[in-house]
Image (spheres, rainbow, N blue to C red):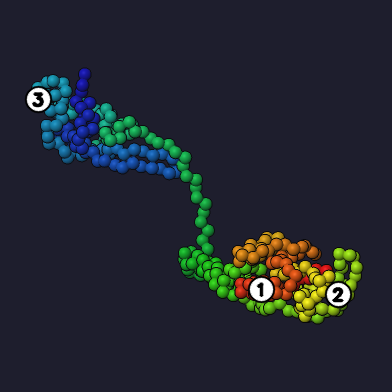
Amino acid sequence: MVQPEHIISQLLLRHNCVIVPDFGGFVAKRTSAVIDHTKGIMLPPKKGLLFNRQLINNDGLLISELSAVKNISFDEATQAVKNMVQHWNLTLNRGARVSIDKVGHLFFDQEKNLCFEQDRFFNLLLESYGLGKVHFVPQKAEAPVIQINTGGKSRSSAWKYVAAACLLPIAFYSFWIPAKTNVLESGMFSWRDFNPFSETGPAKYSKENPVKIETDAKEEVSETGDTYEFLPGVRFPVKPETHSLNNSPKSEVMQSEFIVGCFASEENANAMIRRIKSYGLDAYIFDRSNGLARVSAGSGESDASFNELRSKLSSHGINGWIYRKN
């Protein structure tokens, strides 16, 4: 059989205030969802209830609903509510609790103040019907933050100086390398390019003592000529171009190579080859000696062919020398 206290929870689902005549009123207020990161629990939105002892005037809501549900007259419903209130007062005066289904509990504290405790297991908010607790993996406790003494300055100010110290070298070399080196033209760079105090200049030629050259016939010959200093301690013999190949007897014509560089790195040698080929010229690794790969931009038998080749390469900033083969 439906009791008046059962009607209270049904009315609170649709209304935000239900008054029990001559006793008090229940006031509902919507509360948002709650997330507890430490416990790993998320609670859905709900209606929070408060009990106001001052709301005692009969608004007719509870009695009208009871009359309609039980199909009784308004007077009979009014008397049923009065009997319920009388029973509640007797129960509270004995020091017991009054339990209202799906609403909560009423009781007197030590100072005879009427207190209300809402039912935590029933959600009166229809929007949250069917929603329960959601459990998730809680966040781990964060490691303690170590404060750095920056002489009274904040950590953010200290990080500005750190960022500036890192960006200044990058900005400097972004200007220095393209402006002061030929890395954009040649596609190759050396660690010396990062030293702004190093000086670079044209290749130097110097006289040396007679050099023994081993020919394919395993004969040793000695001649005095110019040498090209490619790297410190690494020199290559260079014959003076005082004799014209066109004036040599036909029996003494030699196939020669126009060498543009010697590379210890295969990757750098291939980069030079690709660069020369991009100008419409042929290039290849002529030979390897003492761990160095010599790159040739072409071969020929006359000074005219080499002069034309030298002119084309010089226009692109590439110089070289003639290697004459016996």
Q: Is residue 111 visible?
A: no
- Mark 1, residue position: 308
The quadrant the N terminus occupies is top left
Amino acid type shown at disc 2: Val
**Percent from the top left, x then y, of residue 127?**
28, 35
Q: Residue furthest front?
A: 250
Amino acid type shown at disc 1: Glu
Q: Toward which corner of the image does residue 263 lie, by quadrant?
A: bottom right
For the residues labelled 1 and 2, say whether their Cβ atoms are less than 8 Å apart.
no
Spatial CA span between label 3 and label 2: 131 Å
Q: Which mark is in front, 1 or 2?
A: 1
- Mark 3, residue position: 74
Taking depth in this image into account, of 284 and 193 the one nearest to the observer is: 284
Residue shown at 18% from the left, 28% from the top = 85
The quadrant the C terminus occupies is bottom right
**Percent from the top left, x then y, of residue 88?**
21, 28
Lower position in the chain sequence, tag 3 or tag 2: 3
Left or right side of 298 for 280: left
Spatial CA span between label 3 and label 1: 120 Å
When the figure is inspected, residue 53 is found, relative to residue 142, above or below; the finding is above
Amino acid type shown at disc 3: Phe
Disc on res. 211: 2
